[in-house]
Image (cartoon, grey):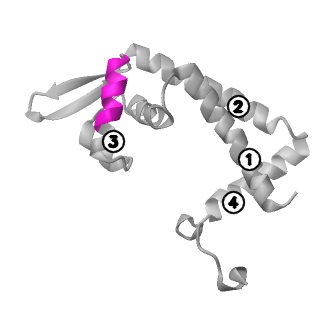
Amino acid sequence: MDEMKLLHQLIDIFKFKENYQHQTSQLQPQDMYTLERIYFHESMRVMDVAKKYHVAPSTLTGIIDRLCKKGFIERIRIEEDRRAVEIKITDKGRGIVQQHMDEDQAFVKNFFDALQEDKRKQFKILLTELVQNINRDKLFELDEEDNS
């Protein structure tokens, strides 16, 4: 199988995961990503989320609105600075993130279990090397010799 077909089949597998988890959580991937970040911190200032996780403030406002409406987080005004808003995960939010992480664990187990043990170990070594050596800034550049 050529590299392009292989890449697109892998993309299809991860898109399947994304769609499955969208169905089970009823959250868009960027909403779940944001909710997970809040989950790991328990609560965060809105601007800290935007800065630390590179989410545009306007995009983050929409995400927070949706998560609040579903009862996954709550906004809290900070007494020392009334302009600052903190977002805190609710029990309902913790539950949906835990469900998501359980699904991630099942996915990872079954993804790697598709290989025999010796191949699985080698694949993990190769994947580790790949993600450590990838240069994201160069992913969409072609070398001059690739253009010929």
Q: Quadrant of residue 22?
A: top right
Magenta region, residue range: 61-70
Q: Residue at x 59, y 27 (%)?
A: 21
Badges 2 and 3: C-beta atoms under 8 Å apart? no
At label 4, the amino acid type is Leu
Q: CA distance from mark 2 to mark 4?
A: 20 Å
Q: Secondary structure at mark 2?
A: helix
- Residue 136 picture location, percent across and down: 55, 64
Residue neighbourhood size for the residue with mark 4, other residues' Cα within 10 Å, grouped as few (<14), some (14–19), many (≥20) = few
Q: Is residue 65 magenta?
A: yes
Is tag 1's residue or tag 3's residue first in the polypeptide sequence? 1
Q: Look at the picture and state if 21 lies above or below 121.
A: above
Q: Residue at x 75, y 32 (%)?
A: 109
Q: Nearer the viewer, residue 50 or 129?
A: 50
Mark 1 sits on what residue? 10
Disc assigned to residue 107: 2
Q: Nearer the viewer, mark 2 or mark 3?
A: 3
Residue for badge 4: 130
Q: Secondary structure at mark 4?
A: helix
**Residue pointed to by mark 3:** 59
